[in-house]
Image (tube, helix red, strand yellow):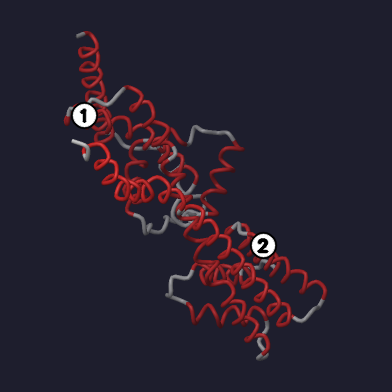
Amino acid sequence: MPSNDALAMLYILVTGFSVYWTVMIIFSKNEDMKVLSWASGNAPVKSKSPAIEISRTLTHQFTIQHAAKIKNKRYRKRIENVILTSGLTSELNVEEFLGMKILWGILFPIVTLILNFALQLEYPLAMFVLMGPLGWNFPNMHARAMRNRRISSVRVDLPFFIDLLALATEAGLDFSGAIQRIVEKARGSGSVLAEELETVLRDITLGSSRAQALRGMAARLDMSEISSFVNVIVDADSTGASISKVLKDQSAQMRLERFVRAEKEGAKASQKILIPLMFFILPAVFIMVFAPIALNFIYGKN
């Protein structure tokens, strides 16, 4: 059939393009790597995610040159904000992130085509069309998952950390000293909030004011709770209010908000459980109760 011939030709073209691309990369040198290096001149830290490490190698070999040609400032600013709020600033820069989007946007359809041909899955053409946007958004999905993980960690730790800050300031330490003491105790625990507070101390050491360092933390975490906490501390600094009292009030407020959030999630859970109840549990109960009666009614007279 003509459609089968066209599909076979498409497989041949995709395979030939993949082989050509691989050979060209292996035997050619990338002369643009100096231009595309990190602005700080330092190599990125190794990512905890194997997906990023694999993607970084492929991206530098295949697509980062094309990512550098994307010059839209508004779009690049949006990508920069995604990297910032997901905590990936030490692992990725904008060029690498864009290169990964291009890479996976191309690889997803190619891999789907190869699997379809090798396993005779007979996917419809729409499947290959959808794989492109899915691959393009794959880095964004990873960044969104990292951001949600950071937010969950910070929400758990924040009231406890604020209590410790209040106790430390009441004991005679200044605010920066209290942060330093908490960071030392929490180092190595994997706490996102402890890492952010350590970054705040580093920024203050490098010459930023306390307000600027705290607002930088609020921008990186992009959470209403952190923004509220930072605003309260900055206002207390500017008005000369007692930091320890402000921290105690803020801790009580955070715990109340967490309790209200837990109540809302519990209410949502009770509503969500109605879906399996209506579509799976109740029909099974009706079958068990009424099926014998129905069978007896139908066949009992015979």
Q: Secondary structure at mark 1?
A: loop
Which label number is shown at residue 227? 2
Task: Give above or below for 35 relative to 251.
Answer: above
**Name of the residue lying farthest toward the right:** 239
What residue sits 36% from the left and 42% below the top? Answer: 60
Rendering quarter of residue 155: bottom right
Pointers 2 and 1 in contact (CB under 8 A)?
no
Where residue 136 sits: x, y (%)? 42, 36
The residue that disc 1 covers is 121
What residue sits 55% from the left and 80% below the top? Answer: 182
Where residue 218 sits: x, y (%)? 63, 61
Q: CA distance from mark 2 to mark 1?
A: 50 Å
Rendering quarter of residue 201: bottom right
Q: Secondary structure at mark 2?
A: helix
Q: Nearer the viewer, residue 183 or 223?
A: 223
Task: Give above or below for 153 relative to 65.
Answer: below
